[in-house]
Structure formats: structure tokens, C-alpha cells
Image (cartoon, rainbow, N blue to C red):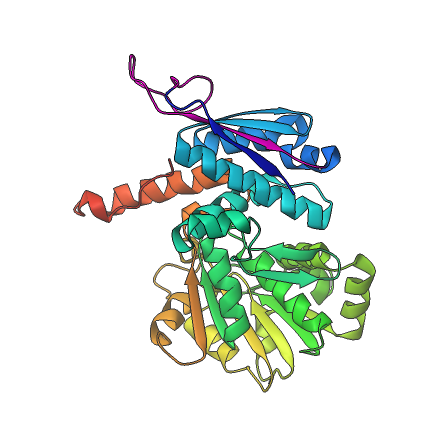
């Protein structure tokens, strides 16, 4: 485990890539030193060309210098202490997994550390730098996959505790990916016998007749994101065998009519493009010992003008019904890439500006810092 050598340098002027100070202003800073036991694991924490270190510098407004297995963090006391906990948390994670970290993992550690600092005493958190707080799912291929932000943590908890879960929000927040991972984990643990994964085959109407090929060739392009998630969580040979035997079924929404789905996890993706009748039909397919997950982005409805989205209608009608969970992701919960997050925020800001000229400024969502 990493060891902190303490704090020093209080009262020194701020320098480097840390937070900017006004000319002539003296900002209280500290130096936090960390030494990790294993050089190889330390290099995984720091990232290729120290990209993880640079990312933490930008996010926490500190300066960090890595050399071998040694790290020195400089910055305001609170920020430097938070950075120390993040590095210690990441080291504990790579010690357990032995695999490289992504920038998403780093962001997750930052959010988890920030949230834990608000919930638990500082001494308690320091004594247990990798104390579990964000929930996780586990599959045989990927091992444990931990939530990267509070919204994902809420999502996983809802999946565990509710028979029907609605997940709404912009692209890149992990709605579909986590749903498929959770479904695969239930299948591997023997809690269900089948996975049934569906989405509206065409954004407005499911008119597939003009496309060449048999039904699978017609709908596969529309279901490709679900296939991609499956191959992330399962070995390819297991996915292919399960598709052949019917353990995993991927089908357009129209194929759900008239069925009762028992002992299964049923996922409906891109649900914002269902009509009211389609959504009602899908919801009433739920059978015994089954779970249903419905994901979509209400801001990207592609139905004909004047036609109501089944997802938007359903979450309003079913609000407060026992056994149903709902999580709403926001632009700040995007986990794909920092640029994707900024793009989503820009579109959200533009939409609020066009449609809310008469709204008060405080009602608008603030852009990312």
C-alpha cells in the first residue's frame, strides 16, 4: 500500500500547473509525498506518459510530479489531500486487478473520493482508502466493474432492488452498457435463464421490408450497440453459442407482441422512440422471476411530429408505483470522453437558451467547469 510522508511547505506561493492566483497574492499550499511499493503498479496508476497524473492535476487544480514509484503533489491543502486519496485509491485498484486504468476510472475515483469525503470522517476514509462506496457489477470476462459516478451507483442499486427500472439521459452515460453487464451477471449466476435484448428497429415505425436480407440481417445494424456491450462482458464464443441456443435473444420491439417473458432479464434500449402503444405492450410482457430495464434519451425522440414518446409517457404514468425504479442521468454524468461531455453540455446549454428565454437564469443547468 502507498505511504504518505506527510505535509510540508505551508505558506509557499503557488507555482506550476496548479490553480491560478492573482498577482501578488500568497496562496497557502502544501506538499504531499507518496511512495508506492511496486514500480510496475505505480506506472499503471500514473498512466502512459503520466496521462492519469495530468488528468488529476486538471480536475483537482494541483501540481503533481511522478518519478519512478515516488509522487509529490503540491496545491491547496484540501485539493492536495483529495489528490492523495485518489492516488491511493487507484493504487489499491490496480493492486487488485493488475490492469491499466482508463481516464474514466480516474474520474470515478475522483468522484468517489469526493463523495466519501462528504459522508465519512477524514480519518476513517484515510484509514481505508479503497473502502467500497460506489456499487459494482461483476462478470467472468471483465471482473468487477465499479460505478464511476453517483448516478451510475444509483443505477446499479436500483437494478439490484427493483423488478423494473427506467434509465433516462444523454448518450455516453453508460445506461445500456451497465444494463447489459448487469443482465449478463444475473445470467452467469443462474438467477435467470435468458437475456432478451430489444430496441425499436427503426427510429420511426420499424419499416424494415425494403432492406435486403433475412430478418436478422435487416435488424442487426440497429441492434449493433447491444452486440458490442455483450462482447464487452462475455467471451465471443459464449455470446455466439448463447445466440444460437436462444439463451440470448436480440430482437426488434415488434417481436415482443403476444409473449410472456419469464425467468429472464429483458432490456429495451432507445425507448424514447417507442409509441405509447408499443411501450404499454412491452411493459405488459413481464412474467414471473423476470427483470425489465428500459433505457432512453428523451431529448432524442425521432418519432413523427405530434406523436408522443412512450418512454416520456410511461415514466410520468408509473411515477411512484411500487417495484419501479427510475434514474435520470445528466450531461455531467457522461463517461465516454471529456470532449463528449463538453459537447453534450454545449447542446444542453443551447437548447435551454433557445427554449427558455423567459426562464430565470438560476433554472438553467450550469455548464461544466
Side (left or right) of 125 relative to 23: right
Q: Nearer the viewer, residue 52 or 125?
A: 125
Quadrant hosting residue 361: top left
Would residue 349 appear left or right of 31 to someone viewing this image? left
**Residue 108 placed where, x, y %?**
53, 47
What is the chief secondary structure element of the magenta stretch? loop
**Residue at 62%, 62% in the rendered image:** 137
Residue at point 42% right, 47% down?
331
Q: Quadrant of the N terminus?
A: top right
Looking at the image, residue 236 sits to the left or right of residue 193; the answer is: right
Image spot of residue 297 (x, y percent): 45, 57
Residue 126, position in %: x, y?
51, 47
| Residue 346 visible to the viewer | yes
Q: Is residue 108 above or below residue 145?
A: above
Asked if residue 260 lies in the magenta stretch, the reply is: no
The magenta-colored residue range is 12-37
**Residue 43 placement: quadrant:** top right
Relative height, residue 111 to residue 251 (above, below): above
Closest to the observer, 252 or 27: 27
**Percent position (x, y) of residue 113?**
48, 47
Q: Identify the residue at horizontal 38%, vertical 17% (top origin).
A: 13
Quarter in which the C terminus is drawn: top left
In magenta stretch: residue 35: yes
Amino acid at each position: 500500500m502507498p505511504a504518505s510522508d506527510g505535509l510540508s511547505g505551508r505558506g509557499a506561493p503557488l507555482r506550476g500547473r496548479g490553480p491560478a492566483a492573482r498577482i501578488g497574492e500568497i496562496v497557502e499550499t502544501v506538499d504531499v509525498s507518496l511512495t508506492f511499493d511496486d514500480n510496475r503498479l505505480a506506472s499503471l496508476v500514473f498512466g502512459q506518459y503520466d496521462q492519469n497524473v495530468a488528468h488529476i492535476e486538471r480536475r483537482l487544480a494541483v501540481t503533481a510530479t511522478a518519478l519512478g514509484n515516488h509522487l509529490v503533489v503540491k496545491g491547496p491543502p484540501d485539493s492536495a489531500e483529495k489528490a492523495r486519496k485518489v492516488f491511493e485509491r487507484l493504487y489499491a485498484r490496480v493492486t487488485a486487478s493488475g490492469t491499466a486504468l482508463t481516464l474514466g476510472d480516474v474520474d470515478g475515483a475522483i468522484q468517489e473520493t469526493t463523495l466519501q469525503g462528504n459522508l465519512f470522517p477524514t480519518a476513517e476514509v484515510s484509514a481505508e482508502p479503497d473502502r467500497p462506496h460506489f456499487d459494482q457489477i461483476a462478470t467472468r470476462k471483465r471482473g468487477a466493474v465499479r460505478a464511476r459516478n453517483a448516478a451510475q451507483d444509483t443505477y446499479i442499486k436500483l437494478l439490484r432492488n427493483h423488478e423494473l427500472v427506467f434509465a433516462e439521459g444523454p448518450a455516453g452515460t453508460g445506461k445500456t452498457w451497465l444494463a447489459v453487464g448487469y443482465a449478463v451477471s444475473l445470467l452467469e449466476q443462474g438467477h435467470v435463464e435468458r437475456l432478451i435484448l430489444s430496441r425499436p428497429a427503426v427510429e420511426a415505425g420499424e419499416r424494415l421490408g425494403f432492406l435486403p436480407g433475412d430478418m436478422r440481417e435487416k435488424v442487426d445494424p440497429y441492434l449493433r450497440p447491444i452486440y458490442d456491450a455483450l462482447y464487452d462482458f462475455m467471451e465471443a464464443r459464449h455470446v455466439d453459442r448463447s445466440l444460437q441456443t436462444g439463451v440470448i435473444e436480440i430482437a426488434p420491439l415488434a417481436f415482443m407482441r403476444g409473449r410472456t417473458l419469464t425467468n429472464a432479464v429483458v432490456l429495451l434500449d432507445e425507448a424514447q422512440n417507442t409509441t405509447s402503444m408499443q411501450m404499454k405492450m412491452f411493459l405488459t410482457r413481464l412474467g414471473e422471476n423476470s427483470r425489465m430495464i428500459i433505457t432512453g434519451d428523451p431529448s432524442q425522440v425521432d418519432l413523427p411530429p405530434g406523436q408522443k414518446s412512450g418512454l416520456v409517457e410511461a415514466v410520468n404514468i408509473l411515477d411512484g408505483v411500487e417495484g419501479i425504479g427510475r434514474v435520470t442521468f445528466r450531461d455531467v454524468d457522461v463517461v465516454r470522453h471529456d470532449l463528449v461531455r463538453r459537447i453534450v453540455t454545449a447542446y444542453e446549454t443551447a437548447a435551454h437558451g433557445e427554449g427558455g428565454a423567459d426562464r430565470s437564469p438560476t433554472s438553467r443547468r450550469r455548464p461544466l467547469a
